[in-house]
Amino acid sequence: SYELTQPPSVSVSPGQTASISCSGDNLEDKYASWYRQKPGQSPVLVIYQDNMRPSGIPERFSGSNSGNTATLTISGTQAMDEADYYCQAWDSSLWVFGGGTKLTVL
Amino acid sequence: QVQLQESGPGLVKPSETLSLTCAVSGYFINNSYYWGWIRQPPGEGLEWIGSIYHSGSTYYNPSLKSRVTISVDTSENQFSLKLSSVTAADTAVYYCARIHEVGFGAYMDVWGKGTTVTVSS
């Protein structure tokens, strides 16, 4: 079955750029989505179709997908961006999530 | 504005069947989209359980397929999850979500608040 791999944790200083990777076989042939989840809250879609931002998501969130890796980039990271981030893709009628990455802003 | 709300027992005994419902407001469920269930065990990541297309076609996580049934009740504008023969490993927060067409990325744009289900005697 298809698998998506994320680093367990990423740290970034306020104001800097955070990059979170998501790896899967030929991931560029699929659409990648990204979700942000803060403690005790439901996941929120922040990127869909590799690089599209839903209404209400700040411009500092961007995405890319090339080769075997999709990347979520947060420019000018703020303390409020500290959360768990999950990538997701669809393959052969199955929905797959990455294991999640805890983003720490310090 | 589309909203989803999960409901169901918060405590289920081992070996019994977990039953949850997701009520959809602001959109007629049989118009379009997939509708899905996702769970999150305590301290762990998200796990897709299964999805149902507005036409009724179902798709299940292979690891749960033998125990899962997802159905739609268009008259009540809701969809349901049944998970049989539960064990403590099924203890989790269960979310329902609206899912866009697979040709458009199959992403989940609207989520319910989640409901906690504990499996314990």
Image (cartoon, coloured by chain):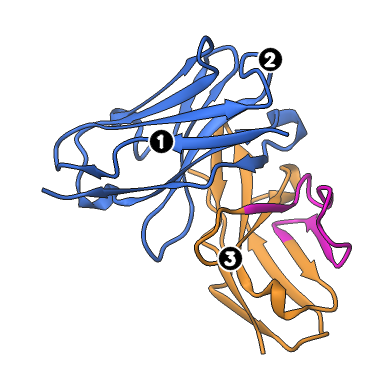
Chain colours: A orange, B blue
Residue A92 at what x, y percent from top left? Answer: 57, 32
Q: Are marks 2 and 3 on the same chain?
A: no
- Residue denoted by label 1: B7
Residue drawn where x is 79% and y is 71% of the image? A74
Mark 3 Cα within 10 Å, few/some/many (few <14, many 20+)?
A: some
Does the magenta segment cover residue B56? no
- Residue denoted by label 3: A38
Q: Which mark's residue is nearer the viewer, 1 or 3?
A: 1
Task: Find numbered disc 2 in the image and state the secondary structure of the residue it sits on.
Answer: loop
Residue drawn where x is 48% and y is 17% of the image? B72
Residue drawn where x is 48% and y is 53% of the image? B46
- Residue reaching furthest right? A59
Q: Are marks 1 and 2 on the same chain?
A: yes
Distance between the alpha carbons at the discs numbered 1 and 2: 23 Å
Residue type indicated by callout 3: Lys
Residue drawn where x is 55% and y is 42% of the image? B112
Mark seen at residue B31: 2
Please, which chain is the residue tagged with disc 2 on? B
Residue B95 at what x, y percent from top left? Answer: 48, 43
Task: Find numbered disc 3 in the image and state the secondary structure of the residue it sits on.
Answer: loop
Does the magenta segment cover residue A69? yes
> With A103 as the anchor, is A49 left or right in this view?
right
Q: Which mark's residue is nearer the viewer, 1 or 2?
A: 1
> With B9 as the anchor, is B52 left or right in this view?
right
Task: Find numbered disc 1 in the image and state the secondary structure of the residue it sits on.
Answer: strand
Q: Are marks 1 and 2 in contact (CB under 8 Å)?
A: no
Task: Name the image quarter holding residue A18.
Answer: bottom right
Please give the range of residues in magenta.
A44-70
Residue B17 at what x, y percent from top left? Answer: 23, 31
